[in-house]
Image: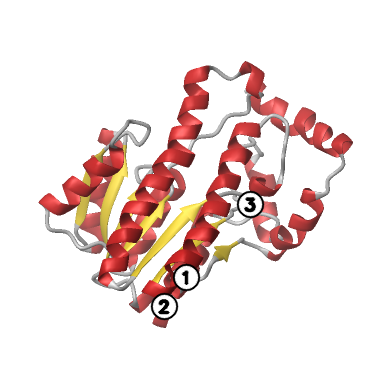
Amino acid sequence: MGVWKELKDRVAVVTGASSGIGLCFCRELARHGCNLVMVSNQPEQLDFYSKEIARDSGVKTYIVNLDLTENGCADRLIEFIDSNNISIDYLINNAGVFSFKPVSETPERKIDCFLKLHVEAVTALSRRFAMRFKDQGRGRILNMSSMSCWMPMPGIALYSATKAYIRVFSRALHYEMRDYGVTVTVACPGGIATDLFGLPEPLKRLAVRIGALATPEQFVKGALKRMVKGKKQYINGMLNRVSIVFVSIMPTGVRMLVKRKMLDRGIER
């Protein structure tokens, strides 16, 4: 209970807050009494879920309809926070984009989206809040990378490359800020039971039972615990932590097999 008590009456900014793991973060934070600034470019879902969370948990929820791929997004978020006199304790950079297409088949606008969302927005928001947290003498940042950051994998090159940037950037920023009472945690999820690869529900449930996959809720709880404790990095599941060694030295033939059997199917869907 000690870790969760830290969240009560605090305020967290969560990007990508209107769906998926971002929404899970919001619900779990609210369950422990943490107020929310929910950021998303999906205004209807944002409005609906912010009201639902406020009603069910009693926390304050603020909504910011913001496209993080637009120039000046960090400035607009800061302006909203200042105009509402909100003191922020946590920043969770969760918003992300995914694509199964190889680089040569990816439209330029999609490539631009990867770079702006995973590199520019994460960098700008982390920097702005790190500066504020430094002045406060406390604060926690959680940035979402991926297990794919260790895998130069054909078919998801843009995703894995930009997630690798997030991991390296976050680890370095953590060391830069540690003397000021500010920590940066990078989460590298792998094996989450979502619909990303189209697994049948019975197989997905079996994978969760044997520990091959984690539910989004399980992952979020683990990530939040590490963030509150000020840990540098979180990789969910022993299997994922052990597999890092193997995926980093995976032979080319195995990478191509994974691409053809799993990633190419994602393109077909």
Query: Circle 3 is placed at which residue position?
Result: 190
Badge 1 vs badge 2, beta-carbon distance below 8 Å: yes
Q: Secondary structure at mark 1?
A: helix
Quick one: label 1 or label 3, which is nearer the N terminus? Answer: 3
Q: Marks 2 and 3: CB-CB under 8 Å?
A: no
**Residue drawn at 17 percent across, 59 percent down:** 86
Q: Position of residue 254 (x, y in %)?
A: 85, 38
Q: Residue at x 83, y 45 (%)?
A: 250
Q: Amino acid at mark 1?
A: Lys
**Label placed on residue 3:** 2
Q: Which is nearer the eye, 215 or 244? A: 244
Picture coordinates of residue 260 (x, y %)? 78, 28
Decide: few, some or many residues near mark 2? Use Cα within 10 Å; few <14, some 14-19, many ≥20: few
The residue pinned by badge 1 equals 225
Query: How many angstroms separate mark 2 from mark 3 (CA)?
Result: 24 Å
The three-letter code of the residue at mark 3 reads Gly
